[in-house]
Image (cartoon, rainbow, N blue to C red):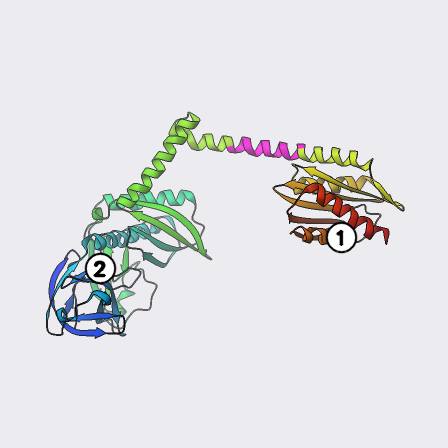
Amino acid sequence: MLKLKYWDDPYRTEFRAEIVNVVVGADVVALELSETYFHPEGGGQRSDRGTINALPVTDVQFSGGDHRTVLHYLDAAHTNLEKIKPGQAAVCKIDWEYRLLNMRSHTGCHLIYGAARKLYRELGYAGFSITGDGTGTVYLNTSRSITSEDIHKLTQLSNMAMLEDLNITTYFVTPNEVTNIKNVVYNVKLPERDVRIVDINGWDVAVCSGTHFTRTIEVGPIAIIGRTKHKKDVTRIDYAIGKNALDENMITHRAISKMSSFFNVNRNELVAHAEKLNNEVEEKTRQLKKVREKYSEYELLNSINNAVEIGTMRLVVVALRNVDQNAARSAASKLMKREARLVLCIVGESGRIFIVGAQSHDLDVNLASPIIQTAKKYGGGGGGRPHLITAGGLTGDVDTIVDDLQSTLLRNLAEV
């Protein structure tokens, strides 16, 4: 039976074994060994890399349902089959730098989950993955949303656990014994064989088959670099480990230093200063909105003097530049409350071109058809209530659209 040795000594990078079987396909060559220190892909961790008899190992996978057969895949295009016959010795070397990245990312994942235990009364484990480049992802099922302050606390707590140099032990239990372990974490169906437990000195205890350090200090610094909503109650936490974490921290440090210098405030005062600026911008935005609405109302009142009379109705089609759609809608609605027998159309430009159409409440004409017809002609679309129609996404010249819309409305309203 194949001996899986990477659990016994995850620091071992060179070993000798016997080639038991060679699997040759159209574009694949894979080896079965009598024993292996290569970690196969599984449980969120990618497989090891390395060489066998100086031939590059590109992938390592379990084969069959018993997880006791492991195939070591070689680059078929550059494999000399004379070097890999059954019964021959296999001189194996594991890519230590790549193994190290995986061990750091995997052990760091346990530290982050242990930190989450401290923050959330109800916490569920929803899986993880590591990329082999010094980054990883853990999915947390929490009873409440994960805030930016939580991210700071998770970062601080997981780094503190790393610096405390906690002991990491592993052992095997039967599947029935797993549930007797206090606070043990797993989210997969337990196998019928013995189950491996990874225990970080009470910080985190989990069913896990990956490669880990024996002390948390070996993980190095941890930086949480992002959080996104994955699905209901589950948040994706992306993190970096070791040098990658240092690089992320340097990016943050440089950004903070530049902002501190730019605003001429102490780094500790940056947040308060940013909040102050944000409040000022919001207040200026509110004031600008009011000014735009007043400007729109003023322009519309002036335009009524040039209304086109169609029977007992009046038609106004006017261009308003540098006014957003909301301000135009608000101004049109207010004007309609004061006017009678009036059809009003505003062609506005704030980014892309929009149309706002309104009619006074003593009229009941079909504004939607000519407005939407014109909007489609210029690449837009719209809809709304009978007395207030909006269209957006138009492209072209505002004055041309005004003339076109007015001609269309004159034809339609003349038939009323």
| Residue 244, position as x, y percentages in the image | 29, 45
Q: Is residue 286 magenta?
A: yes
Q: Residue at x 19, y 70 (%)?
A: 31
Residue 121 within the magenta-colored segment of the rendering:
no
Q: Which residues are magenta?
A: 278-291
Circle 2 residues within 10 Å: few <14, some 14–19, many ≥20: many
In this rendering, is residue 377 above or below 57? above
Badge 1 crowding class, 10 Å Cα cut-off, few under 14, some 14 to 19, many 20 or more, is some
Residue 377, image x and y in percent? 69, 52
Residue 42, given in percent of the width and then of the height, sits at: 28, 64
Q: Nearer the viewer, residue 177 or 368?
A: 368
How many tags in the picture?
A: 2
Q: Give the SS element for disc 2.
A: loop
Residue 207 image position (x, y, % from top left): 27, 62
> Mark 1: which secondary structure?
helix
Q: In the current view of this chain or complex, which residue is farthest to the right?
A: 311
Front position in the image: 255 or 231: 255
In front: label 2 or label 1: 1
What type is the residue that disc 1 sits on?
Pro
Depth check: give the residue in front, 304 or 388.
304
Point out the image quarter for the N terminus: bottom left
Q: Which mark is residue 49?
A: 2
**Left or right, 411 with reference to 166:** right
**Vertical relation: 301 (above or below) 151:** above
**Image position of 71 (left or right of 399):** left
Q: Is residue 72 visible?
A: yes
Q: Is residue 213 left or right of residue 295?
A: left
Q: Which residue is mark 1?
A: 370
What secondary structure characterizes most of the magenta part?
helix
Question: Which residue is rendered at x = 67% and y = 45% of the image?
Answer: 354
Q: Amino acid at mark 2?
A: Arg
Badge 2 or badge 1: first in the primary sequence: 2
